[in-house]
Amino acid sequence: MTFDLLLEVKDLHTYFELEEGTLKAVNGLSFAIKKNRTLGIVGESGCGKSVTAQSIMRIIPRKNSRLRGQILLHHDSGAVDIAQLDEDGDQMRDLRGREIAMIFQEPMTAFSPVHTVGNQIMEALFVHGETDKRAARERTITLLDEVGIPAPERRIDDYPFQLSGGMRQRSMIAMAIILNPRLLIADEPTTALDVTIQAQILRLMKRLQRENGMAIMFITHDLGVIANMADDVAVMYLGKIVEYGAARQIFKDPKHPYTKGLMRSIPKFGATEGVHLATIKGTVPVPLDPPDACPFASRCSEFIPGRCDAAMPEAVTVAPGHSVNCVLYE
Amino acid sequence: MSFSKYLLQRLLYAFLVLIAISFLIFMIVQLPRGDAVDRIVNARQAQGDIITEEEEAALRAQYGLDKPIYVQYLIWATQFARGNMGHSMLGIPVSKLIDERIAATVMLSVISLIATYAIAVPIGIYSATNQYSLGDYFWTFVGFIGLATPNFLLALILLFLFHKFFGLSIGGLYSPGVEEQPWSLAKALDLLNHLWIPIIVIVTAHTAGTIRTMRATLLDELGQQYVITARAKGVRYRRLLFKYPVRLALNPVVNSIGYILPRLISGQTIVAIVLNLPTLGPLLFSALLAEDVELAASILMIQSILAVIGVILGDVILSLYDPRIRMEKGVT
Amino acid sequence: MSTQSDEVGGAVPATGLSNMEERYYIASQQQLIWRRFKRHRLALISGLVLIIMYFLAFTYEFWSPYRAVTQHQGFVNTPPTPIHFFDSEGNFIGPFVYGLKYELNLDTFERVYTEDPDVIHRIRFFTRGEPYRFWGRWDMDLHFFDAGEGKVFLLGADGLGRDVLSRILAASRISLTIGLVGVFLSFFLGATLGGISGYYGGAVDILIMRVTEILSAIPQIPLWIALAAIVPIDWPVERTYFAITIILSTMTWTGLARAVRAKLLEMREHDYIVAAKIAGASDIRIIYEHLLPGYISFLIVNITIAIPGMILGETALSFLGLGIRPPAVSWGTLLEGAQNISNVALYPWLLTPALFVIATVLLFNFVGDGLRDAADPYKEL
C-alpha cells in the first residue's frame, strides 16, 4: 500500500456574508488525505464539517459565500488547486463525480422522488462521456449487485420511495462510486440509518475501499463510527481543527479538552449505574464574527482567562503525527 | 387497484355528482319561473288571444306539467340524458343552438389552459432562478395587477384601448360575415386573428397565479438536497435545473389543471358576454333574461359536465405525470 | 439561527439573548402575528388605505359634493373639471374652477365644453350644499367641498349629468360592505358546517362533504348568474342586497367548510395537542389555549383572502344588470353604463369605477399576503 498524498487542504476559509455579519463556517483549516486511507472528521453539528465537504466539492449552495485558501488535488502529473477553479466551469464539473464523489446523510431527500434510482445512478456516466445506454444500464446493474441490492435488474427501475432506507443508502453509494472516484466524501452517511443497517453500510464502504483503492473522507459526529472506520482523525470545532492524529492515538490519549469531553460523553458498556454520563456544557455557538481566540474557550472547563481568549493557539505536536491546538500544551 | 378501475370509479362518482347537480339546476332554473304553460298563456293573451281553462289544461298535460315535481324532473333528466334537450322558446331545438357553442367553449378553454402554462411556466422559472432581479420584481408586479383585475374589466379596458388608439372593434371570434362561411384557410386565419384578445383576457388571472406558484415551488425545490446531489455528480446546471427542480416544481402546476379547467369554463362567461364570443356564456345569459328555461337549464348542465370532465382530466394527467401518485393508483 | 441556552457557563457566549429576543420568547401568539405583520410594510400600508376607504364609504354623503342621483342639467358628459390655483393673469387665488361653456359640434352632435376664464368659482370647504339624508335617517347638508355657484366634477359627469365621483363614493358603500357581509355569512355557514363535519365525523361528515363537493362542481359564475336572475326586479334595494349576498355566499362557503374541517382534523393530530392531552389538560383548556389561537389566525387570513372574490362577484353581477339595481349604485352598476364601448371611448372617465375595483382587490391581496405570512408560526421573525 502506498500512502501518497491525494488531497491537501491548506488554510481553508469559507465565510458566508449575512445581514447580521460574517459567518465563519470554516475558519483556517488544514489537513491532508492520503490514497487508500480514511480521514475521519468529527465534531458536533454546526462545527463546519459539512461546509468543509461542500467546499472541497465546490457545491456550496449559498450565493453569498467566500472561499479562501488552497485545496490541492494531487495527480501523478502535478496538482490542481480546486479553490482556484470556477465552480460552474467545465474543469470543476469534470472533477465532480469522476475524481471526487460524495454521499449524503439523508438518502431519501438526496434522490429526486420522481426519477428512478437507475436513472439517477447512471446519470454520472452520461455526464462524463458515456453514450451507450445499454452499457450504462448493465454497469449500473452490476454495481447495484456489488453494493448488495438484491434483484438489481428489477430494482434499477424502482423509484426511491419504493426502496428501504438501507437500500437507498446502498444506491447512493453506487451512484457515488460508479466512476471509480479517487476520493469519496461521506457526509454522515449512516446517521439516518438503524444501527444494524449502519454496520452493513460501513462494512460495504470498507470493502469498496479495499477493492477500488479510494480514499475516504468520513464526516460524522459519531465517535463509535469513527473508531471503526478512520485511519486518521481530525477533531473540528467551530470551523477549526483542534486536534489531529492517527485514530489510535486520539482514542487512546486525547489531548484537547474538547476531544476529552467528547470521549467522556460516549456511553460505555457496563458503566456503573447511577454515574451520570458527562456532558459538555452549553451548545456550539454561532461563529458570527468570532473573536480571534480559541473557539472552545466559552465552554472549556479549563479556560484560562487572558490566554485562551487572547489568540488562537498554534498547533503543538505532542507525539509523532499527533498535534493539538491548545495552550495547555504550549 | 388498476388504473382503469380507478378511472371507472372516478367516472361513476362523477356521474352521481352530475345527477345531484342536475336536480339542483332543475330546482334553480325551472321551478321559480312558473311553468311554460303560464308563459305561453301570458304571451298569447298579450297578443289578444283568448284561452280557455280546458285549452290551458290540455297544454299542461301536453308538456307534462300536470305531474308532480319529481316526475317533471325525471322527464327532463331522462330527455336530457338522451340528448333531447327540448326546444328553445325560439322554436329551435336546444341541441342545435348549443352544439357549435360547446365546441367554441371547449376550444377556448383548452387553448387558454395551454396559453396559461406556456406563458406562466417560463416566467416562473425565470423569476425563481433570478430571484430579486429587476425582471423578477417586474413579473411580481404584473402578477399582482393580473390577479387583482377581474377578466371582464380587463376585457372592457382592452376594448376601450383598442377602440381609442386603433379604432378597432375586437369583439367576436370572426370578422363580420365570416362565421357563416364554410371552413377554409381564410376563416381559420380570421379566427386566429380574433382569438388572441379573448385568450389574453381569460388567461391573465390564472397566468399570474401560476407564475406565483411556479416561482414559489421552484425556489423551494432549488434548495433541496437532490439538487446538491446532482451537482456533486458533475451535472451541468442548466440540464440539472430542467431535469430535477423544474420537473418537481411542475407538479403543483400540473395538479392545478383540474382546478383551472373548470374555472376557465366558468370564468369566460362574463368575458364572452363583454366580447360577444359565440360560447355558452352569452347564450345562458340571454336565455335567463328571456326566461327560456329549457335552454338555460341545458346550458348550465353542459357547463357542469364540462367542469367535471375538466377535474377528472386534471387528475388523470397528474397521475400520469407523478410516479408517486401513479404507483398509488396502480398504473403500471 | 438561534442560540438559546440556559446553561452557558462562566465564559462569555459568542451570542447571548438580547432583550429583543427575550421578548420574542414570552410574547403571545397574537402579539407575534401583529409584530410580524407590522414588518410587512406594503401589507400595513394597504391595510391603512383600506380602513380609510371603508371610512369614506361609511360617510360618503359628507365627502361627495353632490348626491349620487342628482342630474346636473347642462353638464351631460362633462370631462373631469380641472382645478386651478392661478387666474389667467397669474395671480394666486387658491383652488378654483372656471365656469363652463359648451357648444354643439355639428359633425358629431357632441357637446364640446370650454372653460370660461371670466367666471371663477372658488372651491369651498365644509360648506352647506345639496341636502341629503345621512344613512337614510338624518337630514343634513354639510359637504366637504363644492364649487359654490359653479360645478366641480373631479372625475367628470355621466350621460345624465351625474357627478361620477359622488356616484363612486356612494357606490363604495354597497360594493365594499357586500364583500364583508358576504364573507361573514359564508364564514358563518362554512365554519359551522365545516366545524360540525370535522368534530362529529361519521355520517354527518360524509353528508356535508358530499354537499360541498356537489356545489363546488357547478361552475361558479354561471350558477351565480342563474341564481341572481331569479331575484325579482321589483324587490326593494335592501332585500336585493341581501339576496345577492346570499347568492354570493352559496358558492364560497363550501371551500371554507372544507378548509375548516381539514384544519380541525389536522390540529387534532398535532403533537402539541396530544402532549397537552397527556399532560392532563381539560378539553376546554385545550380548545381555548391551544386550538383557538391557531384557528382564529387561520380564519382571519382566510376571511381577508375571500373578501376580494365577493367584491368581484357583486361587481360582475351588477355589471350584467343582475345584481344591485338602480337607483341604488354599486361599482358594478356604474360600470354597466360603460358596456357601450363607443360611449366609453368618448367619455373614458366612465371607466374610473374599474380602477377602484382593481385597487380594492389589490389592497386586499396585499393585506392577505402579509397576514398569511405573519400567521405562519414557523416563519422566522
Image (spheres, rainbow, N blue to C red):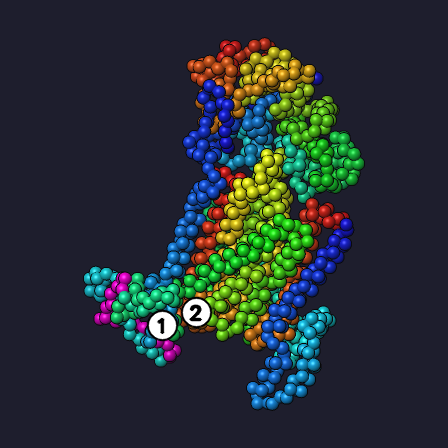
Q: Position of residue A312 (x, y in %)?
A: 47, 18
Using the rendered view, name the quadrant where residue C283 is placed. Answer: top right
Residue C309 location (% of width, % of height): 51, 58
Left or right: B167 with respect to B180?
Answer: left
From the viewer's side, name the closer residue of B331 and B132: B331
Q: Is residue C294 above or below residue C127?
A: above
Relative image position of residue A320 (x, y in whole percent): 60, 10
**Which chain's residue wears label 1?**
C
For label 1, count other residues whose C-alpha is less than 10 Å away and answer few (under 14), some (14-19) or many (20+): some
**Residue corresponding to mark 2:** C328
Please give the residue where the numbered disc 1 appears in the rendered image.
Answer: C70
In this view of the protein, which residue sits in the foreground, B111 or B54?
B54
Residue C167 in picture, x, y percent from top left: 39, 67
Residue at the spot 62% in from the left edge and 88% down from the top edge:
B51
The range drawn in magenta is C107-127
Answer whether residue A132 is magenta in the image. Answer: no
- Secondary structure at badge 1 equals loop
Residue under the point 43% across and 14% down: A306
* Residue B180 shows in the view: no
Q: Is residue B101 above or below residue C206?
A: below
Q: Amino acid at mark 2?
A: Ala
Q: Residue at x 40, y 71 (%)?
A: C346
Asked which quadrant contains residue A36, the reply is top right
Main SS, magenta region, reads strand
Q: Secondary structure at mark 2?
A: loop
Q: Label 1 is placed on what type of residue?
A: Thr
Direction from residue C111 to residue A248 in the image, left or right: right
Tag 1–tag 2 contact (CB < 8 Å): no
Locate residue C12 relative to residue C192 in the image: left or right.
left
Name the residue located 53 percent from the left edge and 12 percent from the top edge: A316
Q: In the visual, does C314 lie left or right of C123?
A: right
